[in-house]
Amino acid sequence: MISIKNLSFGYQKKQLLFKDLNLDLKAGHIYGLLGKNGAGKTSLLKNIAGLVFPKKGICTVNGHTPSDRRPSFLEDIFYLPEEIFVPDTTADGFVKGTAPFYPRFSSQDHLKYLKDLDVPQFAKLKQLSLGQQKKFMIAFALACNTSVLIMDEPTNGLDIPSKAKFRKIIAGAFREDQLILISTHQVKDLENLIDSVLILHNQQIILNKSNEELSGVLNFGAIPNDDLEKALYYEESFHGAQGILRNQYGTSSRPDLELLFNGVTSENKELINHLNQQ
C-alpha cells in the first residue's frame, strides 16, 4: 500500500531529515511510528499524505504518487494532524460540507463514534474544548473509511478515559484491507493497539518489526541481578532492573515498546545486531 524508495527530504537543502530512506507498509496492520523529537516523524507522514514533497526518491500510496494530489488518491487517504483546526461551523455542518469528498463515508459510523467518545452531534465546533474537538475529528477520520488512515499524535490532549475509548474504537473499526499509521511519543498510550513498530532515527527507519516478530526473538521484563550481564538492554527502576533478553527458549512476552525504543535509539549495537539478524 505504501512504498518509499530512496527518499530524501529536508526543509533546507543542507539539512536533510531523511536520506535514502526505504519503507514498505502493507494493509492489515496498525503501525506505530516512534522517534525522538525532531526526528522527522511528522514530515514523513506529510510526505506520505502529499503535503510536502521529497527532494529525491519515490513515494507511492496505492499506486498513486502523493505529490500529484489526484482526487482518486485524496478520497482514499485521511491525514489527522497533531494540532487540528476546526472551522466556525457546527459539527453537523462540517460533516455536510466535508463528507462528500470521501465516497465511503458512513454517517451511521460517525454518529456511533461520536456517541462512544461523548461528543455532541450538533455542537458548534469552536465552542468545544480542544480535547472534544480532537475527538470529533478522530470520529470523522474513522467514519471516512479510507484505506489509509494517518494519525499524528492522536492521543495528545485526550484525558485518560478518552484514551481508553480511542484504543477501543480503533481496534473495533480497523479492517483487514486498511492500513493505519500512528505517530506517537506516548508509547504507553498505544502499546496495546499497534501490531507493528517503526522507529525513525538518524535519517532512517532503523526498525520495522511486528509485535509477533519481536516477541519471537526477544523477552521483555524484570531481570534478576545475576542475569544482567546477559541483557541486551536494561534500565533500573523502583521494581528492579527491567530489560530485554534474547528469547532463547521460545517463551512469549509482550513487547515493552518504551524499553525497545530506548535501547534502539541509544544505538545499543548488541540489541540492534540481534534484531537485524532475524
Image (tube, helix red, strand yellow):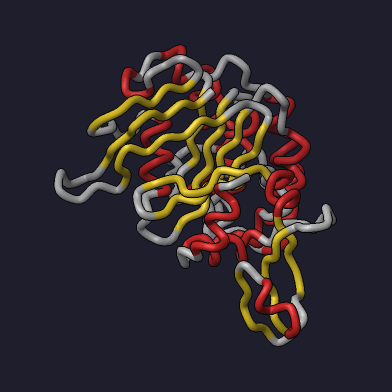
The C terminus, quarter of image: top right
Image x and y of residue 96, in percent: 55, 24
Above or below — where is 159 with respect to 155?
below
Q: Residue at x 49, y 24 (%)?
A: 97
Image x and y of residue 22, in percent: 42, 35
Q: Residue at x 66, y 71 (%)?
A: 231
Image x and y of residue 87, in percent: 43, 39
Out of 160 and 248, give the one closest to the viewer: 248
Q: Residue at x 42, y 22 (%)?
A: 60
Above or below — where is 215 with respect to 56?
below
Q: Residue at x 70, y 40 (%)?
A: 170
In the picture, measured across the screen, residue 97 lies left or right of residue 172, that is left
User: Residue 249: which quarter of the image?
Assistant: bottom right
In the picture, measured across the screen, residue 66 lies left or right of residue 80, that is left
User: Residue 223: which quarter of the image?
Assistant: bottom right
The N terminus, quarter of image: top right
Query: Is residue 222 in view from this perspective?
Result: yes
Image x and y of residue 56, in percent: 25, 30
Q: How many marks?
A: 0
In the picture, measured across the screen, residue 190 lies left or right of residue 266, that is right
In the picture, measured across the screen, residue 216 lies left or right of residue 47, that is right
Query: Is residue 129 in view from this perspective?
Result: no
Out of 75 and 203, give the one closest to the viewer: 203
User: Residue 247: which quarter of the image?
Assistant: bottom right
Out of 230 and 45, give the one closest to the viewer: 230
Out of 232 and 261, give the one closest to the viewer: 232
